[in-house]
Amino acid sequence: MKISARNVLKGKVKSITHGSVNSEIVVELPGGTEITSIITKNSAEKLGLKEGHDVYAVIKASSVMLASD
């Protein structure tokens, strides 16, 4: 797999919640941190995502905002 994004995090699918159009995918990274992604239900099905499967969370954004109280 080759990709131009610089932030690629390997993890395992922890849970999948399908809606009528979108699916919520929770990915658990090594160490227990979780990342949640919302993708189309069609994409989740095409990728064959199942709980326990290894996946890559690919983050490519022109900006990442931070906030503090």
Image: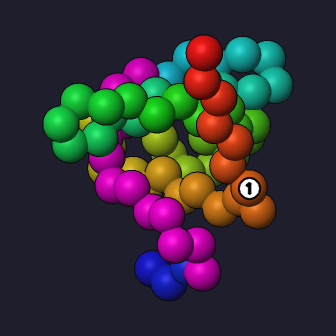
Residue 13 in picture, x, y percent from top left: 37, 35
Q: Please name whichever residue, 17 or 69, is drawn nearer the observer in this view of the structure.
A: 69
Quadrant for the N terminus, please: bottom left
Q: Main secondary structure of the magenta part?
A: strand
Q: Nearer the viewer, residue 35 or 19?
A: 35
The C terminus: image quadrant: top right
Looking at the rendered structure, the secondary structure element under dot 1 is loop
* Residue 61: image location, x then y, percent: 71, 58
What residue sits right under mark 1 in the picture?
Answer: 63
Q: Is residue 66 above or below residue 19?
A: below
Range drawn in magenta: 4-15
Q: Residue at x 48, y 51 (%)?
A: 57
Q: Is residue 47 something that shows in the picture?
A: yes
Residue 50 visible in this rendered orientation of the protein: no
Instruction: Say whether residue 13 is left or right of residue 36.
Output: left
Question: In the rendered image of this protein, does residue 12 appear above or below residue 63?
Answer: above
Name the outermost residue toward the front. Answer: 69
Left or right of 1: which side holds 39? right
User: Left or right of 16: which side holds 67?
Assistant: right
| Residue positioned 31% across, 31% down in the render | 33
- Report if residue 7 lies within the magenta region: yes
Instruction: In this rendered view, identify the residue nearer to me: 47 or 56.
Output: 56
Q: Nearer the viewer, residue 25 or 50?
A: 25
Residue 27, given in percent of the width and then of the height, sits at 40, 35
4 is higher (above) or lower (below) than 24 = below
